C-alpha cells in the first residue's frame, strides 16, 4: 500500500511540474500557418472556420485541479495580470458571485461532457468551458438586451450558417449546434489573430474590429491594447472577468464546494422525419419529460418540427426511445402553426383540423376561446388530412349593419377582441376597425373606448 501511495503522489507531482512548464508547446504554435491580418473576412471564411489548423492544445490538468496540490493556475496562453487578480479577489469576496457561478455550473452538467469533448476536438484552451458562465450563466434561454440568445449568446445575424430560427425552433438555444458554432468562430478568430486573448475579444466585439486595432497598433499584446483603451469598455471587462471566473471555477474543491465525480450525460442524435410530441414520447418511453426537454431547448413548442429534426437523447435511453419511435402506433400526426385572422374561432379550427377544442387549449396554454387576438399563433394537431384553413365566408361580406351609423360607444373589457366586439354589435371587423382608425390586426386593450353601431 505504501509503495502504491508513493507512486501515486510522484505521478501527481510530475503532472504538476509538466503543467507549470507550459501546456502549449512552442513547436505547436510554430506550426500554425502564417495568415496576414485582413480588415474584412470573406463570407466563405465565416461559414467554415479552418479546424484543420494546428491550434495549440492545452495539457489536460483536470485530475490535478481536483487535488489539493500545487498552485492555482491557468493554461500557459493566459497570464494572471493584475486586473485578472482584482476580478478574482472580487469573486472571493462576493457570496452572490460565488452562488451565481455554482448555479451556472449546475446548469452546465447535462452539457459538460459534450462541450469538453468538443473543446478537445477543436484544440481549444480547456478554460473555454467556463466562457458560458460569463456569457449566459449556462442558461439556454438567456437573452441579452441586444438580443443575443443561448448559452453562447448568438445574435440573429451571427448564427448562420450553424443555426436557424423559425416558427418551430430557435437553434441558438441548441446546446449541440451553438457549441459547434461558438467553437468555429473562436477557431476562425485564432486563425486570424494568432492569440487566444484577441480571439476571445473578437468573440465579444467582432473580429474585424479587433483586426483593425491589431493592424494599427503592431507589436502590442492584448493587455497593452486594453490598457490604452483601444477596445470597447465591455470587451476590456469581459476578458479579465472570464479569466477570473475560469480560475475560480476550476478549483471549486479548494473553495469548500462538493465535487461531482459522477459521469456526465452522453448525448446521441436520433433523426426524425415526422413530428413528435415530447410529452407523449416521454410517457410512452417511461422517462421524465425534462430529460427530453433539457436536450432540445431550441424547440418553440414541446413538439418537434414536421420533418428533418435531430432529437437529442441521453445514450442510456436511446434504445428505449428508438423502440417507441419505430412503433407506427406511436407516431404523432402532423401539426400546423396557424396565425389567427379576423373571424377565426377555435370552434371553426376544431371542425377543420379535427382536434376537439379542449385539445387546442391543451396545446396552447393561456389561450381563451372567447379572446383570440388577431396575429397570435396557435399550434394545432392535424387529425384530418386537410389543407390550410380557409374561411367559408369572407369577413368583408359579413357587414350586417353597413347602413347603420356608429353613434354609440363601447369600453373594451378584459378578453375582448375586435372580432368578439364586431360579432356582439352585428357588424364586420373591417368596418369596426375602419370606424375607429384601426387596422384589423391591431391589438386592443381594456379601458379604451370604441365607436360602435
Image (cartoon, grey):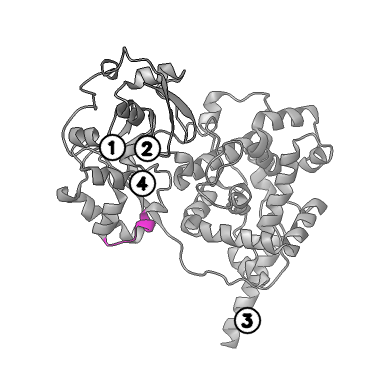
Q: Is 134 placed left or right of 261 in the picture?
A: right
Does the segment drawn in magenta span residue 418?
Answer: no
Q: Earlier in the sequence, mark 3 or mark 4?
A: 3
Question: Crowding near pointer 2: few (<14 within 10 Å), some, many (20+)?
Answer: some
Q: Residue at x 67, y 25 (%)?
A: 38
Q: CA distance from mark 1 to mark 2?
A: 9 Å
Give the numbered dot on residue 306: 1
Q: CA distance from mark 3 to mark 2?
A: 58 Å
User: Could you say whether the residue bearing mark 4 is in a helix, strand or loop?
Assistant: loop
Q: Earlier in the sequence, mark 4 or mark 1?
A: 1
Give the numbered dot on residue 365: 4
**Which residue is the site of mark 3?**
6
Work out whether residue 118 can be spotted. yes
User: Could you say whether the residue bearing mark 1 is in a helix, strand or loop?
Assistant: loop
Q: CA distance from mark 4 to mark 2?
A: 17 Å
Q: Residue at x 45, y 20 (%)?
A: 438
From the viewer's perspective, is the residue at label 1 or at label 3 nearer? 1
Tell me whether circle 3 and circle 4 mark residues in contact (CB < 8 Å). no
Q: Earlier in the sequence, mark 1 or mark 3?
A: 3
**Which residue is the site of mark 2?**
168
Tell me whether circle 1 and circle 2 mark residues in contact (CB < 8 Å). yes
Question: Crowding near pointer 4: few (<14 within 10 Å), some, many (20+)?
Answer: few
Q: Residue furthest front?
A: 407
Q: Residue at x 75, y 32 (%)?
A: 214
Q: CA distance from mark 1 to mark 3?
A: 60 Å
As displayed, is residue 343 above or below residue 347? Answer: above
Amino acid at each position: 500500500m505504501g509503495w502504491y501511495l508513493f507512486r501515486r503522489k510522484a505521478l501527481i507531482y510530475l503532472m504538476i511540474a509538466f503543467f507549470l512548464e507550459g501546456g502549449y508547446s512552442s513547436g505547436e504554435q510554430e506550426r500554425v500557418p502564417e495568415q496576414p491580418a485582413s480588415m474584412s473576412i470573406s463570407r466563405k471564411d465565416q461559414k467554415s472556420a479552418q479546424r484543420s489548423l494546428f491550434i495549440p492544445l492545452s495539457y489536460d490538468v483536470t485530475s490535478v485541479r481536483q487535488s489539493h496540490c500545487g498552485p492555482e493556475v491557468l493554461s500557459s496562453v493566459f497570464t494572471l495580470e493584475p486586473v485578472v487578480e482584482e476580478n478574482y479577489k472580487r469573486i472571493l469576496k462576493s457570496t452572490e458571485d460565488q452562488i451565481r457561478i455554482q448555479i451556472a455550473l449546475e446548469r452546465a452538467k447535462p452539457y459538460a461532457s459534450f462541450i469538453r469533448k468538443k473543446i478537445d476536438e477543436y484544440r481549444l484552451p480547456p478554460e473555454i468551458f467556463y466562457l458560458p458562465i460569463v456569457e449566459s450563466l449556462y442558461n439556454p434561454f438567456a437573452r441579452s438586451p441586444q438580443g443575443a440568445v443561448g448559452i453562447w449568446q448568438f445574435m440573429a445575424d451571427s448564427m448562420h450558417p450553424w443555426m436557424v430560427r423559425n416558427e418551430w425552433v430557435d437553434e441558438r438555444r441548441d446546446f449541440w449546434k451553438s457549441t459547434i458554432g461558438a467553437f468555429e468562430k473562436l477557431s476562425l478568430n485564432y486563425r486570424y489573430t494568432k492569440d487566444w486573448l484577441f480571439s476571445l475579444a473578437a468573440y465579444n466585439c467582432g473580429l474585424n474590429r479587433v483586426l483593425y486595432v491589431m493592424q494599427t497598433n503592431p507589436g502590442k499584446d492584448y493587455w497593452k491594447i486594453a490598457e490604452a483603451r483601444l477596445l470597447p469598455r465591455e470587451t476590456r471587462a469581459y476578458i479579465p472577468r472570464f479569466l477570473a471566473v475560469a480560475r475560480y471555477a476550476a478549483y471549486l474543491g479548494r473553495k469548500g464546494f462538493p465535487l461531482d465525480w459522477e459521469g456526465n450525460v452522453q448525448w446521441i442524435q436520433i433523426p426524425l422525419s415526422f413530428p413528435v410530441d415530447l410529452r407523449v414520447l416521454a410517457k410512452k418511453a417511461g422517462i421524465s419529460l425534462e430529460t427530453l426537454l433539457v436536450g432540445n431547448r431550441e424547440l418553440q413548442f414541446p413538439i418537434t418540427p414536421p420533418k428533418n429534426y435531430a432529437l437529442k437523447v441521453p445514450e442510456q435511453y436511446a434504445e428505449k426511445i428508438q423502440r417507441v419511435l419505430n412503433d407506427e402506433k406511436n407516431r404523432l400526426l402532423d401539426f400546423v402553426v396557424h396565425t389567427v385572422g379576423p373571424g377565426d374561432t377555435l370552434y371553426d379550427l376544431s371542425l377543420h383540423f379535427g382536434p376537439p377544442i379542449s385539445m387546442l387549449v391543451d396545446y396552447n396554454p393561456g389561450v381563451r376561446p372567447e379572446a383570440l387576438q388577431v396575429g397570435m399563433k396557435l399550434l394545432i394537431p392535424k387529425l384530418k388530412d386537410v389543407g390550410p384553413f380557409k374561411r367559408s365566408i369572407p369577413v368583408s361580406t359579413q357587414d350586417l349593419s353597413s347602413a347603420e351609423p356608429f353613434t354609440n360607444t363601447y369600453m373594451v373589457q378584459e378578453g375582448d377582441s375586435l372580432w368578439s366586439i364586431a360579432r356582439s354589435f352585428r357588424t364586420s371587423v373591417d368596418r369596426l376597425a375602419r370606424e375607429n382608425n384601426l387596422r384589423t390586426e391591431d391589438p386592443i386593450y381594456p379601458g379604451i373606448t370604441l365607436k360602435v353601431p
